[in-house]
Image: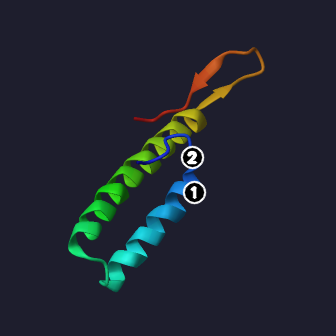
Amino acid sequence: MVDENASFENNLKELEEIVEKLEKGDVPLDNAIEEFKKAMDLVKACDNRLKDAQDTIAKIVNENGEVVDFNVE
């Protein structure tokens, strides 16, 4: 289970560790499948964090306290 409250960096580190384990190839198939599922959950959590950060960066509060949206999509 992935901790949704974990930092992006912690999730990314855990994802890298799983990838390294799987690349070595000495993980039993059942464990490899579980690790792969966990890795996909970590990818999703990292992607959500990045999207949140992008949304935050795309907006800025000007001197009048108004939010200015710089999102170019």
Residue picked out by circle 2: 6
User: In which quadrant is the C terminus drawn?
Assistant: top left
Q: Is residue 33 left or right of residue 71?
A: left
Residue picked out by circle 1: 10
The local secondary structure at tag 2 comes to: loop
Q: Residue furthest left?
A: 29
Coordinates of residue 8 in the picture (x, y in percent): 55, 51
- Residue 47 vs 34, above or below: the answer is above
How many numbered tags mark residues here? 2
The local secondary structure at tag 1 comes to: helix
Quarter residue 40 falls in? bottom left
Q: Are marks 2 and 1 in contact (CB under 8 Å)?
A: yes
Q: Residue furthest right?
A: 63
Residue drawn at x 41%, y 53% as measured from the top left: 42
What's under tag 1, amino acid-wise? Asn
- Residue placed most toward the observer, 29 or 11: 29
- Residue 12 vs 44, above or below: the answer is below
What number is the disc on residue 63?
none
Coordinates of residue 59 in the picture (x, y in percent): 59, 29
Residue drawn at x 39%, y 54% as measured from the top left: 43
Quarter residue 38 falls in? bottom left
- Residue 6 vs 66, above or below: the answer is below
Residue drawn at x 58%, y 34% as measured from the top left: 56
Coordinates of residue 30 in the picture (x, y in percent): 22, 67
Alpha-carbon distance for marks 2 and 1? Answer: 6 Å
What's under tag 2, amino acid-wise? Ala
Q: Residues within 10 Å of mark 2 (few under 14, many from 20)?
A: few
User: What's the image's color scheme?
Assistant: rainbow
Q: How crowded is mark 1: few (under 14 residues within 10 Å), some or many (20 or more)?
A: few
Residue drawn at x 36%, y 59% as measured from the top left: 39
